[in-house]
Amino acid sequence: MNRKLIILSLLFVTCSVIAKAQSKKTGNFKTVWESEFSNKANVISMINQEGTFILGTDGNSATVLNGDGKQIWEGDYKKITTNKTNSSEFQYYIRNKDGGYLFLFDSRKLGTDRIAVIDVKSGKEMWNSENYQNLLAKGGGPVETVNYINELDAFMIAQKDGLNMVNAKTGEKIWETKLFKGSIGKYVYNKSKNEIVMINYKPTALAALFSGFKNQLVKINAANGEILWDATFRGTIEKKLITREALVNLDVRGDKVFLWLDGLQCFNADNGQKIWEVDYENDMSKSSSLLGNKNQKGIYGTLADPIFTNDAVYIVIFANRSRTKYVEKHDLATGKLLWASEKIAGAFSMPNVYRTNDRVMVQVGGKVEVQEIVTRRTTSGTETQYKIYTDHMAQKNGILSLDDKTGQTVWRSEKFDKRITDMIIHEGKTVFVGDGDQFYSYDISSGKQLFDVKHNDARVGKATDVIDFNENVVVLSEKGLASYKKADGKRVYATDKLPDVDFFYEIGGNYFLRNQKNSKNVIYGVDMTNGDIKGKVESKGKGGSDRYGDGIDITENGEFIFAFKGKKVEKIKVNN
């Protein structure tokens, strides 16, 4: 099945109204225009960042509209390409302000695989090649052998005998190296030195081709491909189920490179020598099949990212044997353990840690990211749905305030029987956090409870998340929103019921909520100051951005929504 390779980055906010002493207000988005593609767009239906180019493709052709809904061009791949790329097995859209690139893969069973790149602005072939083989996994799936390096406007193409850097506009091979094998899991580009620090992984479905594979962390000269140093890292990189994002973090801080993979590994940025490491198991739930069928589910974001200061790093540790979690503080230069917090038994997730003044705030429990592939039987065969959402796991929940010098628990609260929202830290002095039915504020230094609000009185369902909005905290709930003043917990407003809201987004200062349950994809826009609903879009189409779900894409500034359904496309204004 054709899928777009777009990175997720995680997701949605806002909704309806009922304000204290205010009348409810529900509006409708205004349609700017409706238009049609020449083809039936069922593979890619997306916009560039500004919505000035709208791309719709099927397996054999593409149509591009401008920001006014007028056709710029349309054409069959076999007529556009000069290497006869026609029935494209996989299509990959790289978006930019000038339109971007449409990358076509034609994996031929008998013969040489083909690729072609089309300029979305003009509809002209930019280049094609038959030099790169075995880019696709047999049987379909995302492309793990091609990475677009935005800073260099270049493609990194992995082959079994090495890595190639290719100019995205011309297809010219800039350099190749036999010393780096596999796909790029993460990279950090240094513009001043024109150098890249990157790590590799073995493409899952093409593992047999990379027989000489080894884990590599390298610094490379981006101009000529010279390997400046090469180091081996410990661990195996997993990928997210739908977005295929590598589950690894890479960070360059001064003269050190930090790699987060089954622990934290620290390397010298000048020569690649390992300086120190903290070894622990990452308890990220690996993608697994459900009930022995084709449905799959992956759970991510169960451990907080490390927190770095000028001289220390704070890490959430997962102890596999005892199934407990705790926080450790290590010296940044040597890795020496400075302190370890108390151990928390029965904690499935500890997703957030904050350092503020002389305290370290630890959140036990909370939302995790879920990526799920569900295949259903229909009257016409089978239908596959790709879902990305947040969820709360059953576990022991609470918050801890640790002394930054000793790691000792200064105070803790476990008033979170069923679930816990993320924490919001205000001015380094106050923490706001809720469970399903209550909403609390604590003094960070002393642990004194400043207020306790009965959130269930807002009648918007159980709390799932919190949004920091100026002087208020907005509580995202299963059936709407409720907003509370940070100063005293007084409710500002509560919305009408909006069932099955499971995601929120802040995009360019605009807020959106999403409902994607029961095969729906509904987007609401909300004025966060008063809870008024700006409008609603319910998509029944396919395509759209993986980030926003079937049939929907949104401009980078959050001002316009594009809704797709086959040949039809609608441009919708968010703010009237």
Image (spheres, rainbow, N blue to C red):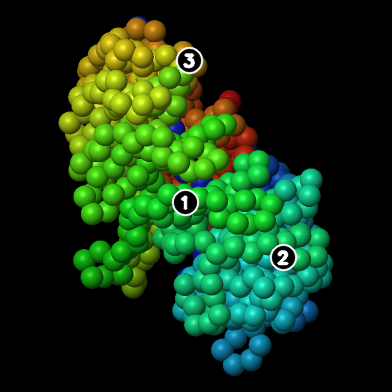
* Kind of residue at disc 1: Glu
Query: Which dot, 2 or 1, sits closer to the camera?
Result: 1
Q: Is residue 316 left or right of residue 232?
A: left
Given residues 188 and 155, the one toward you in this image is 188
Image quadrant of residue 468? Answer: top left
Given residues 496 and 254, the one toward you in this image is 254
Q: Say whether residue 420 is visible.
A: yes
User: How many angstroms separate mark 2 from mark 1 (CA)?
Assistant: 23 Å
Query: Crowdedness of circle 2 by 10 Å Cα count: few (<14), some, many (20+)?
Result: some
Against 432, residue 215 (above or below) is: below
Query: Which dot, 3 or 1, sits closer to the camera?
Result: 1
* Kind of residue at disc 2: Ile
* Kind of residue at disc 3: Glu
> Which disc, if any, is residue 227?
2
Q: Is residue 384 left or right of residue 392?
A: right
Dot 2 or dot 1, earlier in sequence: 2
Against 407, residue 9 (above or below) is: below
> Which disc, if any, is residue 277?
1
At x 24%, y 45%, the residue is 324
- Under circle 3, the secondary element is loop
Dot 3 or dot 1, earlier in sequence: 1
Q: Say whether residue 462 is visible.
A: no
Q: Residue furthest left?
A: 417
At x 48%, y 15%, the residue is 427
Residue denoted by label 3: 427
Q: Residue furthest bottom?
A: 110
Give the x, y percent position of residue 120. Answer: 73, 59
User: How many angstroms separate mark 3 from mark 2 (CA)?
Assistant: 45 Å
